[in-house]
Image: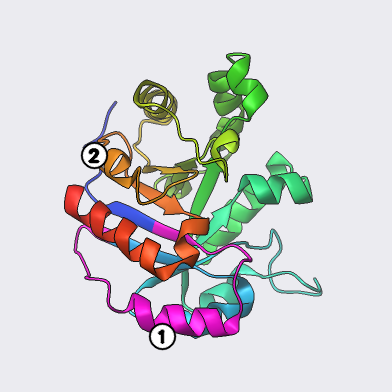
Amino acid sequence: MTTSKISKKYFICNFKSLLLKEDFLLIKDQISSLEKSDKIELILCPPTTYLYIFENTDYKLGSQEISMYSNGAYTGENSAEQLKSMNVSYALIGHHESRNILNETENTLIDKIVNAYNNHIKPIYFIGEDKNDKLNNQTQKVLNQQLNLLHKLSKEILNELIIVYEPVWSIGSGEIPNMDELNNNVKFISSIIENNYQTTIPILYGGSINEQNIEYLSQNENISGVIIGESSTNIDILKEIYQKYQKFI
């Protein structure tokens, strides 16, 4: 069963760990000049340290990380309860950088997704192939494996989930998939979700998005939004990307 086309578009800024407090104070002031749109959900994801700077802004707030544990004696963890108390509405889960550094297992990712959902935080789940997978024509096999955890989630959680297709080989490389690659892989992801779970989940694209390729991405009807990494740390570039995205969707 295929459900109706998703109309809302997502524009997510993942600031990673690239800026300091004074930078975020400046970004907070400057980002307020972006023209709001009913068609776009603008989500800001600063490091946990600086979430408070954006706590009372008009934009949605996302966390770059979320604990698999609830509140308790877990030094250094960021529980879903704590994040929700800071007006966090979204959480990034399974980003390649987190998987690679922390060696997160499927069960860990499931616990994080469930914790987010139970605290009314929308989980944003990342999947994507690396360069070797791509060269060996293993992309769809890898994507299927990374989507395997969906069968352990309830229908209620699936209906709140957002998926980001972010090829690992694209991150920081300046390269993005060509139109055929992107469409084939996004359609493959959609078909798994629709055929196996009888629902439609927003699928976003991430990886080396900049002011040159955003027009191409914004006109792709198969993706429901974008997540901007390093380019979001330069407010002038971010504004240009956002304005072009808003113009062409």
Up the image or down, 213 lies above or below 79; here it is: above
Q: Nearer the viewer, mark 2 or mark 1?
A: 2
Q: Name which residue type carries label 1.
A: Asn
Bounds of the magenta segment: 12-40
Tell me what residue is drawn at x 55 percent, y 56 percent.
92
Tell me what residue is drawn at x 63 percent, y 22 percent.
133
How many numbered markers are drawn?
A: 2
Q: Which residue is mark 1?
A: 56
Tell me what residue is drawn at x 41 percent, y 70 percent.
235
Dot 1 alpha-carbon crowd within 10 angstroms: few under 14, some 14 to 19, many 20 or more: few
Dot 2 alpha-carbon crowd within 10 angstroms: few under 14, some 14 to 19, many 20 or more: few
| Kind of element beneath mark 2 | loop
Q: Quadrant of residue 152?
A: top right
Magenta-drawn stretch contains 232 = no
Q: Quadrant of residue 126?
A: top right
Instruction: Give the spatial CA distance, label 2 vs label 1.
Output: 32 Å
Q: Quadrant of residue 151?
A: top right
Q: Position of residue 156 (x, y in %)?
A: 43, 48
Q: Position of residue 101 (x, y in %)?
A: 76, 50
User: Badges 2 and 1: C-beta atoms under 8 Å apart?
Assistant: no
Farthest-out residue, top: 137
Judge whether residue 249 can be spotted in this image: no
Q: Which residue is mark 2?
A: 219
